[in-house]
């Protein structure tokens, strides 16, 4: 059990390991058929205690594209958790059936508990407002593909920076690269947590906090929009007051550079106007596609099917 590799945080992989992972993801995009039978005898369990469409379907599609099979549940009410079963017991049972598990849970740290008791690799598919590492891998791959590398750019993160697990994961991951400047765009009620800004200060990474998106649009190489998440609010009045605080429309994007790109982890509500979808700077649907490739590469990596192992099998096949 001790030599199992899990993914709880993007920081679980070194930058060199991430480059190798992204290289595999790019190869998958360009040569999908080569990978179609790599997991013919493997089973992925998707244990989603919290609603998800994009992430769950992306994981399931990734395994199916690799030739594997999928089991699992899409809602805690459809699992033995509704009877009071612990996460630790659930993963022990799942370990008897599957080869790898992707888990989403509303409680921070729950996937880590699962990993501590698992006999198979566990992937954190989102835990509360804490981490969403595979979305971060998707974001990093998208930035690398568009920018050419993961160094020397200015990124604005806009919207719900307090509860946004995708934002927190991405900032931590990008903090390992050089020449990154962060601009945090949010109302005071949803500002970035102090532990993030303290980390940036400690690493001498430049950042600013602003309220108006228009004020910083011309500076940005990337704009990472997020929705205000109703499910994270205790007070519906606060949600209603803040949900439309930022709406990216044609007028605002005209202030941006021609080679600036808009990212969004999705789903969106109305924080990006549909009139932006056909703008060449809109990269969020390509981001979704990259999520499939990076999850395929991650499954192969955690199942210890390294690139050399893949190439060896392909040579035998062809």
Image (cartoon, rainbow, N blue to C red):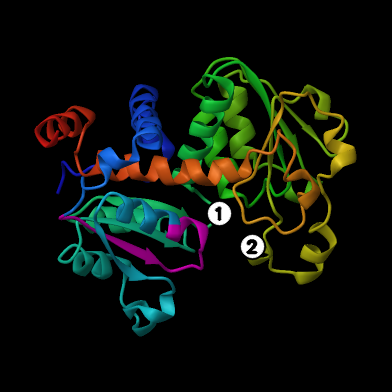
N-terminal label among 2 and 1 = 1
Furthest toward the bottom, the residue is 83
Viewer-proximal residue among 33 and 277: 33
Does the magenta portion include 194?
A: no
The residue identified by callout 1 is: 129
Q: Which quadrant of the structure image shows residue 309?
A: top left
Which residue lies at the image location 38% right of the left edge and 45% below the top edge? Answer: 295
Q: Is residue 133 toward the left or the right of residue 162 in the image?
A: left
Furthest toward the right, the residue is 251
Question: Label 2 crowding class (10 Å Cα cut-off): few <14, some 14-19, many 20+?
Answer: some
Q: Can residue 273 be seen in this view?
A: no
Question: What is the CA distance from the residue labelled 2 to the residue labelled 1?
Answer: 8 Å
User: Where is the C terminus found, in terms of image quarters?
Assistant: top left
The secondary structure type at the circle numbered 1 is loop
User: Mark number for residue 232?
Assistant: 2
Does the magenta portion include 55?
A: yes
The secondary structure type at the circle numbered 2 is helix
Q: Can residue 126 be seen in this view?
A: yes
Q: Is residue 96 toward the left or the right of residue 150 in the image?
A: left
Asked if disc 2 and disc 1 are in contact, CB closer than 8 Å, the reply is: yes
Which residue lies at the image location 31% right of the left edge and 77% below the top edge? Answer: 85
Furthest toward the front, the residue is 318
Query: Could you tell me residue 172's position as x and y percent?
Result: 52, 33
Query: Could you tell me residue 50's position as x and y percent?
Result: 48, 67
| Residue 239, placed above or below residue 13 | below
Question: Label 1 crowding class (10 Å Cα cut-off): few <14, some 14-19, many 20+?
Answer: some
Q: Give the range drawn in magenta.
A: 41-57
| Residue 54, placed above or below residue 220 | below
Query: Could you tell me residue 115's position as x and y percent?
Result: 28, 53
Viewer-proximal residue among 80 and 214: 214
Which residue lies at the image location 26% right of the left edge and 46% below the top edge? Answer: 36
């Amino acid at each position: 059990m001790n030599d199992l590799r899990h993914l709880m945080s993007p920081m679980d992989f070194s930058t060199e390991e991430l480059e190798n992972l992204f290289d595999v993801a790019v190869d998958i995009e360009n040569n999908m058929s080569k990978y179609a039978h790599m997991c013919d005898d493997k089973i992925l369990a998707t244990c989603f205690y919290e609603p998800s469409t994009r992430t769950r379907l992306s994981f399931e599609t990734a395994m199916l594209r690799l030739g594997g099979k999928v089991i699992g549940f899409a809602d805690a009410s459809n699992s033995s958790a509704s009877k009071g079963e612990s996460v630790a017991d659930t993963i022990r049972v799942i370990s008897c059936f599957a080869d790898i598990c992707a888990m989403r849970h509303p409680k921070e740290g729950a996937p880590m508990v699962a990993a501590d008791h698992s006999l198979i690799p566990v992937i954190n598919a989102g835990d509360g407002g804490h981490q969403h590492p595979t979305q971060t891998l998707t974001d990093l791959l998208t930035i690398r593909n568009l920018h050419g590398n993961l160094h020397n750019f200015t990124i604005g993160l806009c919207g719900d920076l307090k509860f946004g697990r995708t934002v927190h994961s991405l900032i931590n991951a990008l903090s390992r690269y050089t020449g990154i400047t962060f601009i945090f765009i949010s109302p005071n009620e949803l500002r970035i947590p102090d532990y993030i800004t303290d980390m940036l200060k400690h690493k001498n990474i430049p950042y600013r906090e602003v309220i108006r998106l228009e004020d910083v649009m011309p500076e940005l190489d990337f704009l990472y929009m997020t929705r205000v998440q109703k499910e994270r609010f205790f007070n519906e009045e606060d949600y209603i007051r803040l949900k439309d605080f930022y709406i990216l429309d044609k007028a605002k994007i005209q202030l941006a550079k021609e080679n600036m790109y808009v990212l969004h982890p999705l789903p969106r509500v109305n924080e990006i106007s549909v009139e932006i979808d056909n703008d060449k700077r809109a990269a969020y649907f390509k981001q979704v596609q990259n999520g499939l490739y990076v999850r395929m590469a991650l499954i192969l990596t955690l199942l210890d099917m390294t690139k050399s192992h893949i190439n060896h099998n392909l040579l035998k096949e062809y």
